[in-house]
Amino acid sequence: MEIRDYVRERDRDAVFRIWREVGWYKEGRDEIIDLFIDAGRALVAEIEGAAECLTLSAPGTLRYLDETLPLSAVTSVITSLVARRQGLARRVTARLLARDALKGAAVAGLGIFDQGFYNQLGFGNGSYTLGFAFDPAQIQVPGGHRVPRRLGHDDWEAVHRSRMARVPAHGQVTLTPPIITRADMGWGDTSFGLGYMDGPNGELSHHIWIGTDAIEHGPYNINWISYHTREQFRELLSLLGSLGDQVRLVRMDEPAGIQLQDLLRQPFRQYAITEGARHPARARALAWWQMRILNLNTCLASTHLSGEPVRFCLELEDPVSRFLDADEGWSGIAGEYVVTLGEESSARPGWDAGLPTLRATVNALTRMWLGVRPASGLAITDQLDGPADLLARLDRLIRLPVPCPDWDY
């Protein structure tokens, strides 16, 4: 078994065979798959002369309060049916993380098929994403909306720029290659967008992108909504509400900082009326994403917290090292550190016997640092432990907005 860079001329047929075997392939979407592969780093595991596992990452950014950190977004991990249970996915993904870390990525993130697998590589659960399915006729927002512009697949460059400029929020993920947006837009046969050209030079300022397999009555899936001001958000919601004359159901994730239920008329009544229907109105919460720190120094240098500083010794475990060779150049971030968290934060290798000790995996530490859950809660459910006084001080200091990636990948 050999792990190496993907080479299109050598590996494309085998990789497309894998996509077909696992049921991810869509007829007529060969160009879109190529775009996803070309958007960043691609590694394969080769067995008997053929690629049997593919792992992809795309460069991006993570918003941490007012700071922006370089992100490795793992966009695909896929293994053929003949190569399952060989440890290929873990080893190839670990190698991908090492390569991206050496190139400067401070954090890595991915979407999960279920929790547990990527925890073996140091990833920890993100916060819940709240999703709503509702009749758009039930939307109630102040003001109205103007006639929008239609957006199609050929508008991908303008759409990507609009996504890049959307309102910032803690935990927000942005994938920087424009071809990622082109691929996202091209995956659905009947997807389309609506938006407004209110930028300083007539650029696309705010828009929604919609996917559906049922054009007439829906459901419509809001794949993303991009805006920069509250007035723009309200206009897009009013626009979405106008579709209620014909569309019966819309599915939409709650944007960062917004309580979507505030903008729906009698939501509990709709849940009761549609219970048991084919497309019921409902709300659901799901932690579909995970993240892990790749460079502790970079992440803490960008961490500025208001409150009394906290200093402690950190015993950090990183499970990714089990899947990396010694000569890889990066084998995770396990070790002993003296950590300061506050307005100016840092982590330096070493030990101070006069400080309390926090013991954690990188999985749990990442969740605490992001504000997914407080230290005291992680001490109950995850691999993080320390004196009660230290946990209480960390709880008081790390009070962050709920992290919201706002980008499916």
Image (cartoon, rainbow, N blue to C red):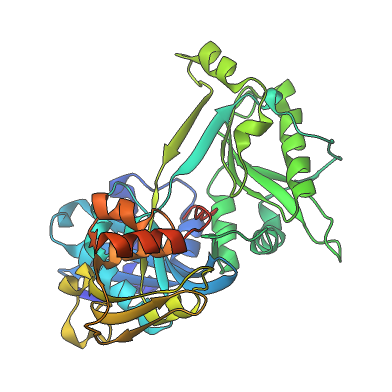
Provide residue 262's location: percent of width, then percent of height.
Answer: 65, 32
Looking at the rendered image, the quarter that the N terminus falls into is bottom left
Q: Nearer the viewer, residue 76 or 230?
A: 230
Q: Residue at x 55, y 63 (%)?
A: 174
- Nearer the observer, 359 or 269: 359
Whether residue 338 sits left or right of residue 84 in the image: it is right
Q: Is residue 9 left or right of residue 144?
A: left
* Identity of the residue drawn at 30% across and 62% down: 389
Task: Note whether residue 135 is visible.
Answer: yes
Question: Foreground residue, 325 or 126?
Answer: 126
Q: Residue furthest top?
A: 273
Task: Examine the rendered structure and indicate whether residue 70 appears above or below residue 364.
Answer: below
Image coords of residue 35 (percent x, y): 50, 63
In the image, residue 283 sits, relative to residue 266, either above or below, namely below
Q: Is residue 282 above or below residue 151?
A: above
Snapshot quadrant of residue 107: bottom left
Q: Compared to 229, does 147 lie above or below?
A: above
Question: Which x, y percent locates residue 83?
Answer: 16, 57
Of residues 240 and 183, the one drawn nearer to the viewer in this rendering: 240
Q: Is residue 75 visible?
A: no
Residue sitting at x 55%, y 72%: 68
Q: How many marks can you see?
A: 0
Left or right of residue 158: residue 80: left
Q: Where is residue 115 drawn, in percent x and y?
A: 28, 49
What residue lies at 54% left-to-right and 33% top-to-bottom?
132
